[in-house]
Image (spheres, rainbow, N blue to C red):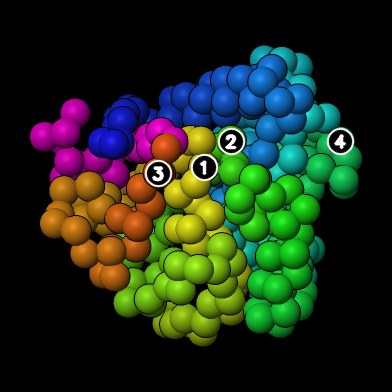
Amino acid sequence: MNPLIVIFPDLDSLGLAAAKQFSDAVLAAVRQRGQALVALSGGSTPVRLFHKLASAPFAAQIPWEAVHFFWCDERCVPPDDPESNFGQARQALFGPLNLPEKNLHRIAGELEPEQAALVYTELLGQFKAPGLSWPVFDLVLLGLGADGHTASLFPGAPLPEQAPVLAVTADYQGRPARRVTLTPLALNSACQVIFMVAGAEKAEAVKHALLDPPDPLRYPAQRIQPIHGALHWLVDVAAAEMIRSLS
């Protein structure tokens, strides 16, 4: 299935569109099953979305008590660390909305990567879909790094597709990184996946992901191909500079 690509004039309009899609996906899931399962990512673009969701009209129209939050990836740092994806979401979204802790299923970043991956795998098993050992997420929100990584799926790192969660050690932007990530096995079973990408520094990575011949080892975002779900790319004009032929 080809992705739906939408280009926005600025980050604010991108964030508003993402908030609308978030609301629509959650409302549909709650109507059908009584709950919605959402996997979040960290970064500056998702923060803009979080602020939108914590404000009118979304704060009042979304049944937050029925939404369960998970994470696509996490750095192995405590939840109060400035680099924690969970901490970022708690400050921008969960805190303002006063969401209950029972709905927040974070990766235990304070643990060592291998242990955190094991604990998260067991947590996902509590929400597993029939025939799987992990949940089918109603919505997955992903970003894209300038190097082409998404979640903590880095260029050159092969993945064991039999595992939905993986401990990751990588040299990211000159720094050793210890992380835990969902793998394409879990991400590609989602009902809907949305990439949110902004900034001129991401333009080349967007082009590689969407226009280049398949090379998922080099361009990890190409690994995200939902089996039955929808794939949307929400991109601002700066990040879309090299994919104008697709618009």
Residue 18 appears in view: yes
Rate crowding at label 1 as few (under 14), some (14 to 19) or many (20 or more) other CA atoms within 10 Å. many
For the point 47% across and 81% down, the residue is 170
Q: Which residue is mark 3?
A: 227
- Give yes or no for contact between labels 2 and 1 (Cβ–Cβ under 8 Å): yes
Disc 1 marks which residue?
190
Q: Amino acid at mark 1?
A: Ala
Residue ID at (86%, 36%):
98
Residue at mark 4 to residue at mark 1: CA–CA distance: 27 Å
Dot 3 crowding, Cα within 10 Å, few <14, some 14–19, many 20+: some
Q: Quadrant of the C terminus?
A: top left
Tell me the amino acid under the disc marked 3.
Ile
Q: CA distance from mark 4 to mark 2?
A: 22 Å
CA distance separating discs 4 and 3: 35 Å
CA separation, marks 1 and 3?
Answer: 8 Å
* Circle 2: residue type: Asp
Chain-order first, disc 3 or disc 2: 2
For the residues marked 3 and 2, what is the alpha-carbon distance in whole angstroms? Answer: 13 Å
Q: Quadrant of the N terminus?
A: top left
- The front one of 4 and 178 is 4
Residue 50's spot in the image, x, y percent?
Answer: 63, 37
Mark 2 sits on what residue?
138
